[in-house]
Image (cartoon, grey):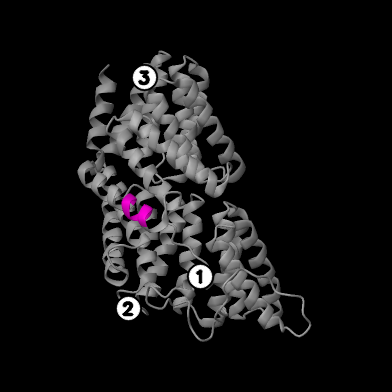
Amino acid sequence: MNAKAVWTRMRERLPAWTRAKSTRRPASVLRRAHEPQPPARSQPTTAAPDADVSDADRWAMTMQAGAEHYDRGHLALAVDAFRTAAQLARGFGPDDPRLAVSLNDWAEACRACGDYVTALPLCEEALRIRGRALGPSHPHVGISLHNLAALLLEAGQLDEAALAFERALNLLGGSLSPRHPDLAACLCGLAAARKAQGHYSEAAEHIRRALAIRQQTLGQRHPDVAACLNALGDIHRELGEYDKARDHCERALSMTRELLGQEHFAAAAVLHNLALLNKTQGRFAEAELLYRQALAIEERAFGPQHPSLTATLNNLAVACLSQRRSADAESLLRRALAICHERLPAAHPDAGLVVANLAEVCRLSGRLSEAESLCRQALSIVESALPPDHPHRAAILNNLAIILRSEGQREQCMTLLDRAIRICAEQAAANNLATILRKNGRV
């Protein structure tokens, strides 16, 4: 079995300015009197160096410009604007709420660019400021915790992300309406973390709650509703419920294209999950076509080196490998691995999956020594990044066992297969995988 990345992209993180301006949902907790509101402007602008303009007004104009650049997908310009706003806000004092908002939005723009190294300390500083200024139980602290959790999730720190999402949910749940959109966003984040940890049933419960909130507050056809349907569809795929998975993902794709357009990055996320479903069902040519459509949209939206591309490149490579095109698969995986090395932490789980699949390419090409080295490297990464009972561990243990068996190391092969079977036995959703592994052990 080839390990594969499962990356459900739920674009929950938006700048505070953008969220505060929304008129299609109940007021966000970010929109409170003690945190400044954006002035009404129609086009992105930058603060003019006019001596008559106060620093407070200049800060507000710069924040507005940053939010509008972000909305238009001009992320580098958004980063510059929010950085400038944060520099201005430092002049208002170390605990001024405007500084926390600036740091939050600067971090979000960096995250959207894939610059997690810069984003993480900005998120942490915003959280500290809000904790000092507002108290540890204030809902704005919950928002900052959610932002930090979303960043930790994308950086592959799954346990820390899940804990931060749970803390955020507890804070927000105690102060907001049960139907508040910020609760739905936090539930989606917690679901993504639990799914990445392999806890699919729990993830599905969180997504269903978020979906119900969004359908009640936003209506049946809204981009955030589509995001929930997409996420829930991919969880159904993990649970082997393929008809439900296809129905949810196809509804999400239709809704996303209608509301946001054919080329929006949210459409790429749904295409990715539909491709993954086709691949899981053995429809490799259809999967490849969908992966290539998703990859083209992501490259136009984020550029050729963004971390978001690693999952699509990895899974496209698996589709090619399933069609016995090892050379194409290896080229795609090496491109994905280069992005991982440049843009992701060394122990990111996505890097482990890319290395594991590259090892499989080497095995099929007869390069057993290289395959074993890569597979051991992949196992080391996922053992440090994923829970002990995660299915991806079992998949990589299985791959390594097959390599060792090909090298005549039957005793070590059986030991690894036993470890993989024990992991599968602890995962109710992985019974089919356990059967396959037991068969491999008898060969």
For discs 1 and 3, the disc positioned in front in the rendered view: 1
Q: Which numbered disc, 1 or 3, marks the residue that appears first in the sequence?
A: 1
Disc ID at residue 18: 1
Is residue 21 left or right of 417 when viewed as pictured?
A: right
Kind of residue indicated by mark 2: Ser
Q: Which numbered disc, 3 or 2, marks the residue that appears first in the sequence?
A: 2
For discs 2 and 1, the disc positioned in front in the rendered view: 1
The structure residue drawn at horizontal position 36% and vertical position 17%, both measured from the top left corner, is: 410
**Position of 108 relative to 371 (above/below):** below
Q: Which numbered disc, 2 or 1, marks the residue that appears first in the sequence?
A: 1
Q: Position of residue 282 (x, y in %)?
A: 29, 29
Camera-side residue of 303 and 112: 303
Calculate the distance from the C-alpha at mark 2 to the C-alpha at mark 1: 21 Å
Camera-side residue of 388 and 202: 202
Element under disc 3: helix
For disc 2, the marked residue is: 177
Element under disc 2: loop
Q: Position of residue 135 (x, y in %)?
A: 50, 81
The quadrant where residue 146 appears:
bottom left
Calculate the distance from the C-alpha at mark 1 to the C-alpha at mark 3: 59 Å
The structure residue drawn at horizontal position 48% and vertical position 36%, both measured from the top left corner, is: 313
Kind of residue indicated by mark 3: Glu
Camera-side residue of 24 and 154: 24
**Position of 321 relative to 422 (above/below):** above
| Residues at discs 2 and 1 in contact (Cβ within 8 Å) | no
The quadrant where residue 182 appears:
bottom left
For disc 3, the marked residue is: 411
The structure residue drawn at horizontal position 31% and vertical position 64%, both measured from the top left corner, is: 210
Principal SS element in the magenta part? helix
Calculate the distance from the C-alpha at mark 3 to the C-alpha at mark 2: 58 Å
Instruction: Tell me the magenta residue range.
Output: 253-258
